[in-house]
Amino acid sequence: MSKGFSNARKVIRIIHTADFHLGVTFRHIIGSQVTEKRREDFNRNIKYIVDIAIKRKVDLFLISGDVFHRSDPSPRDFVEFAKYVGKLAEAGIHVVVIAGNHDKPKIAGAQNPLQGLIEARAPFFHYIQTLPKRPVILNVKNTRIGIVPIPYIDPRLVKMMLAVGYEEFIKEKIGELKDNPVLKDTDYNILMAHLMLSGAEVTDIFPGYMEEPRVSRKCLYEDFFNYIALGHVHKPQKISKNIYYSGSIERTSFAEEKEEKAFLYIELGPNETNIEFLPLRCRPMVSQKIIVREVSNPLQVLLHSIKMSNIKPGALLKLIIEANIDSWKKIEEKWTTVEDELINNIRVLGYSVVKNIYDIPIISRKLIEPRKIPLRKRVLEYIDSLLVDDKIKERAKELAERLMDEVGMP
């Protein structure tokens, strides 16, 4: 339990969370209820965090980026999140949100729907999508709190448009905001940022994620701030006595299957700071590798191995199967039997399959020709792989198709 303070008026209670990724898709996982159940999983954990915030009578609810997985979330996801903002407002809790890389629109001038809550003057709601000119100042319980918000800044834009490195740019912007005169008479100062910090434990969850430039601790001016609330890295972790990643609220990929999820409860007091990780209940994600040697009935071997794997009902399963090409053919001919075992008997929520073909005889190799992919298809597949919104991809593919038609590309 958190310790009490002698001067209760000066104690500020905070929830720090991030990386909700509402609307993240699981299209690579087979299962009739995957989309709906996963939406329920994410919303259940948000509800739990909000309920704890209200129960503990917190003053600030900090979300350090990536509320949504897309900058144009579905109306259903937006309304669900707005409902929780309303519950926090009813309790008089300030909600401060900074934009993450998934929240920020990819088109100049576009807005995330969260901006609509600002335009509607939603009480106690603060959303920062771009670098602000001054810190956010909040008055809570006769206490002035200064918040320096650093939403996600695309390193590629910094590289293209500015003559400074990414790390230097971040340090400069935090320095400018912390030196703003409005912070001179604050009781507490908090930094919120969505970035990759040097020394953080990072899991490879999205394409390009691991290649992002790191920012060192010296750029955060940690001695100036009472608490630094970070987002972007999905693993909850303590970096230093006042620097924390809350992590994501649910597992978004099998790379996170062994990670426990959490959020943070903080008490800032005049003499000490108490920080507590609060665990979240998450759906299990399991990778199971099965090797099928050359046998007369590879299907039965596979089914027996699945039954002996002790896979939990309701889990999301990544099934990694190694077999030679002949065994694969026999398994695939009766794959509905395997799916029936997984969905109806073991009752996994959904599954994906990774097929590893091994030990191909030399004769068979000669019969297998390399897959020839037409250039047109390669161009379209490349566009599909880009880390941009689906709408942008579709426009890019339409333009590419027209250009390829003009030059007669097959």
Image: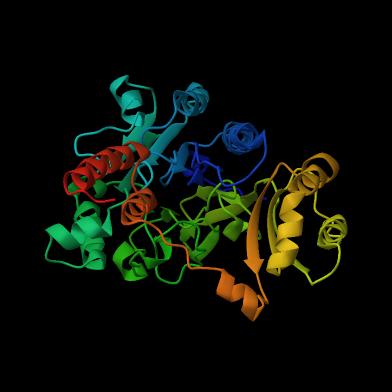
From what the image shows, is residue 266 above or below residue 205? above
- The answer to which of 41 and 196 lies nearer the viewer is 41
Asked if residue 174 lies left or right of residue 43, the reply is: left
- Residue 228 point in image, percent of width and height: 41, 55
- The answer to which of 359 and 194 lies nearer the viewer is 359
Residue most extreme to the bottom? 362
- The answer to which of 383 and 369 lies nearer the viewer is 369
- Residue 156 point in image, percent of width and height: 24, 59
Asked if residue 31 lies left or right of residue 27, the reply is: right
Picture residue at 33% right of the left edge, 67% below the top:
215
Residue 48 seen in render: yes
From what the image shows, is residue 280 above or below residue 292? above
- Residue 324 point in image, percent of width and height: 70, 70
Image quadrant where residue 320 sits: bottom right
How is the rendered protein coloured?
Answer: rainbow
Image quadrant where residue 328 sits: bottom right
- Residue 134 point in image, percent of width and height: 21, 44
Residue most extreme to the top? 120
- The answer to which of 94 and 337 lies nearer the viewer is 337
Picture residue at 44% right of the left edge, 28% below the top:
74
Asked if residue 347 lies left or right of residue 370, the reply is: right
Residue 172 seen in render: no
Q: How many marks overall?
A: 0
Image quadrant where residue 163 sits: bottom left
